[in-house]
Image: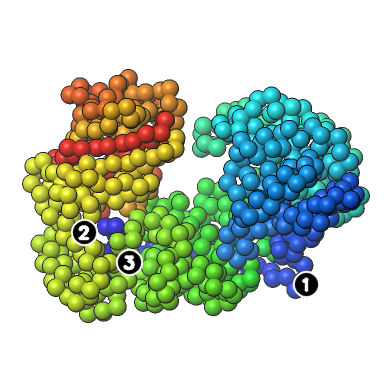
Amino acid sequence: MLFLGLLLSTSVKAVPYALARNQSVQVPPIKIPEDDGKLTRDLLVRQTKWLEDKLQEKFARRHQNAPWLADSLVFIHEVAPFLCFNATKNSVTGITTRPSAELLKQGRKLIADGCDDPIFCYLVAWIESFMSTPTTQSVQLFSSRWRSLLGTSDPAVFKAMATSWLWFACAAENKATSNQDIQAGCEAELPGLIVAALEEMSDNEDSTGVYLALYASRAKTFISSKFPFIVAGLEGCKGAPWLIDTLLGESEIDEAWVFRGNGWGASVTAEGWKGFEEHLAKARERLARSWVAKPDAPWAAAGMITVTLAGHGLAGVDERAWFDRATVAVFDYEPAYTALLSAYRPRWGGSHTLMLEFGKACADTKRYDTIVPSRLFKAVSSVVEDLDCRMDVYKDEELCGRIVELQKAMLARTDGEAEKHYFRSFLVTNAFLTGDYETAAAAYIELGGKPMYVEAVDRLHYFGIRPIIWMGTLALYADRDTFKIFKKAEEAYLSFDLDVAQNLYQELQKTAITQSSKAVSQLIQMRLLSIAVEKRIATGEWVHLSNEEGRLLWMATQNTWWTEPNGVLVLKNSRENVSARIILNARIGLDFEVRGRLSNASGLHHSQFGITFGYRWSYQGFATAIGGVTRFNPMENGVALVSWAHDTSDKNPPVPIEIKPDSVFCLRVKNGVATLWVDDKELLSGDTKSLFESRDPWSEDDPKQNLIGLGCNYFPKGETRFKDLQLRRL
């Protein structure tokens, strides 16, 4: 929230070092297809038709005299797109349409009417799981018919798809549907079923169909996870050579990363590097051979981008060359864009500037009927992941202009009110982030009172901009003279000129727009309350928030909290392993003390509490003192200091502790050392500077800008209550 003054400032600072243009970066334009049939949706239309024909062929023959045959064939027709990977994903917005409850109801009715064919039961189970996750009901529905399916004359590819779905649904990770016996049975059958599916192909269309079917189901996941045990069978398979090479090449990439791990290079063992290199060499051989055999397929070429960025590509063929080969086959093949953007990251020898220039090249295609132009937004998001302060990317005026220009162009070329609402919502978001309040305010009005699309609101949330901020700011912008006063107030507040800021906000309280707009009134009131609290904090005395201060200044960043009288903070959740965090929007700095009491009702489990510090709304990284469960494993209890809200590690092991329903806690942070007491017993005292992996809040422009917060995690489900909260600056 505190960076809003920077957004409103008329001066634009230099682009940060991470984005500095020390030299010109040229990214070649992306070739636009001249022929029809080169888009992902064309491929998916053909694949959906292939799936439907294959499904109906043997099924219709088996039940040609059944009274429910016609209705069941209609059901198969409607289910086919959901079996086809991304066939129900909008090629422009990226939103996936899920099956309707009515479709599931129709499937269950047909089963009740006598259509209990094994393949049909699988389709109904698949639809139910596609709606959310596999359920006990869907697993029971199909598992009782699974063995019967293996004995039918249906194509082996559907047997492999159905078995891999059942294997995944019964895996130990899925607590509700876990079944080790069924999982083991599936693992025994799947290698043979996959080979049979590959050898059953009769032509090129079959080959493509089988690859996509295996990719869409969990069969591809099974191949990668069990690769060492099934590689020999795949190597001896008599299916299409290009397809075998593609599957094995992609699995070799996965296996290479199993050996290497996902940590920094310094953490990789000698054995890990050896396995990494050996498997990437095999991937290179297979994928390059696959592309030569079938250059009109994008998969092998896209895989070679990853192989090449890891330093194991073909001599003279860089990542961009493989990208061009993949997109000539399928222009908007999204994994190719994702892989090249990854290859352009600084960690792989690229730069943030290169990533953004590639994003601009995507926007320059102007193929608004595809997802390609929006890769500029993806490039911005990817760069943001590397920056200490997320908002730094928006200090580039030229980039900001391109972002808003692209969003306007996408909106102008959108058909259908649903898509228009989606792009208007994101125009509000992107224009606000770039500081173009005129465009943001106009787009918000054009929403006509409809709520913003949830993903657009989440994007603002990612940058720490809560609804009270953006809604109030856009409402203020309608009165330009009042908005100028607001800008001055925000700049004064950001620079800790609290008396000046307070006078300006009080002046704003008297304006007509503040008195007529709830959004503006809440924003101004929040700022005045922040100033009042910060003035009390500055004295060094203990500060207790009033009910009104708590209601407007505590802001949830994860999950839903609410305040009760006397400043009690409450979170109640009905699910396990759910994190929650709430931040106090009044600045306390890096040297502070906070104390309070856990206030859980009798019988309610309190598995974890956390005190967050060094937090800034748009900045990466913070630290947390955790008490209770200190790993995402409910068996390990204690207190510890952690980075962000992550698990403890060997560097910061937990100290044993017993958390009681009414335990008193106190955290003191001074000169980079944090000391935590629980029930008047000092439990730990440790260095906090090492916890800030992404940033150093002590060396930022003004460390006093940092905030504190509270959080929790659930093992098992329960309730968290904090009361008697007090804080002071040291």
The quarter holding residue 111 reads top right
Q: Could you tell me which secondary element the residue under label 1 belongs to? A: loop
Label 2 amino acid?
Met
Label 3 amino acid?
Met
Instruction: Please tell me the numbered disc located at residue 471.
Output: 3
Closer to the camera in the image, 278 or 76: 76
Q: CA distance from mark 3 to mark 2?
A: 13 Å
How many discs mark residues in the rendered view? 3
Q: Which residue is mark 2?
A: 526
Question: Mark 2 near mark 1, Cβ–Cβ under 8 Å?
Answer: no
The answer to which of marks 1 and 3 sits earlier in the sequence is 1
Q: Could you tell me which secondary element the residue under label 2 belongs to? A: helix
The answer to which of marks 3 and 2 sits earlier in the sequence is 3
Q: What is the crowding at mark 1: few (fewer than 14 residues within 10 Å), some, or many (at least 20)?
A: few
Closer to the camera in the image, 326 or 197: 197
Q: What is the crowding at mark 3: few (fewer than 14 residues within 10 Å), some, or many (at least 20)?
A: some
Q: How is the image coloured?
A: rainbow
Residue 439: x %, y % from top left: 40, 76
Residue at figure coordinates x 13%, y 63% from the top left: 502
The answer to which of marks 2 and 1 sits earlier in the sequence is 1
Label 1 amino acid?
Asp
Viewport quadrant of the C terminus: top left
Instruction: Please tell me the numbered disc located at residue 35.
Output: 1
Q: CA distance from mark 1 to mark 3?
A: 46 Å
Direction from residue 440 to residue 497 in the image, left or right: left
Viewport quadrant of the N terminus: bottom left
Question: Mark 3 near mark 2, Cβ–Cβ under 8 Å?
Answer: no
Question: Mark 1 near mark 3, Cβ–Cβ under 8 Å?
Answer: no
Residue at figure coordinates x 76%, y 34% from the top left: 146
